[in-house]
Amino acid sequence: MSQKATAAKGYPSPTHVWVDLSAKHRAQAIYLMAQLAFNFVEAQAITIYQEKSHVTVNSSEDSPRSS
């Protein structure tokens, strides 16, 4: 009863839209996608940095061991 994922009826596929874009609009779309990717990576790096600043590292001598 599984169906193959398809685009919603009535909407063109991204390939058809891309072909119809002018060179200027293609360049703008590429720039915006690159900016989106950069912002995503930057946000991930900031999150990791903030998480690391909240973590304290215990040496093996400080942590109790269960026997």
Image (cartoon, rainbow, N blue to C red):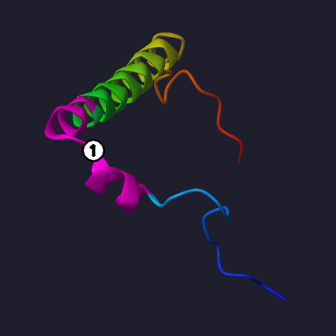
| Image quadrant occupied by the N terminus | bottom right
Measuring from the top left, give residue 42's x and y in whole percent.
34, 21
Q: Residue furthest bottom?
A: 1
**Quarter of the rendering containing residue 30:** top left
**Is residue 25 part of the magenta span, yes or no?**
yes
Residue 11 image offset from top left, x and y in percent: 58, 56
The quadrant in which residue 10 appears is bottom right
Q: Is residue 38 left or right of residue 67?
A: left
Q: Nearer the viewer, residue 23 or 65?
A: 23
Residue displayed at 59% across by 26% down: 63
Q: Nearer the viewer, residue 54 or 17?
A: 17
The residue sitting at 27% across, 44% down in the picture is 21
Is residue 10 magenta-colored?
A: no
Establish if 11 lies above or below 32: below
Report x, y in % for residue 4. 66, 80
Q: Residue at x 40, y 28 (%)?
A: 40
Most common secondary structure along the magenta stretch: helix
Residue occupying image coordinates x 22% and y 39%:
26
Quick one: SS at disc 1?
loop
Q: Residues within 10 Å of mark 1 (few under 14, many from 20)?
A: few
Nearer-the-camera pick, 18 or 5 = 18
Residue that badge 1 annotates: 21
Side of 34 relative to 1 (left or right)? left
Q: Is residue 31 left or right of residue 6?
A: left
Query: Start and end of the magenta stretch?
Result: 14-28
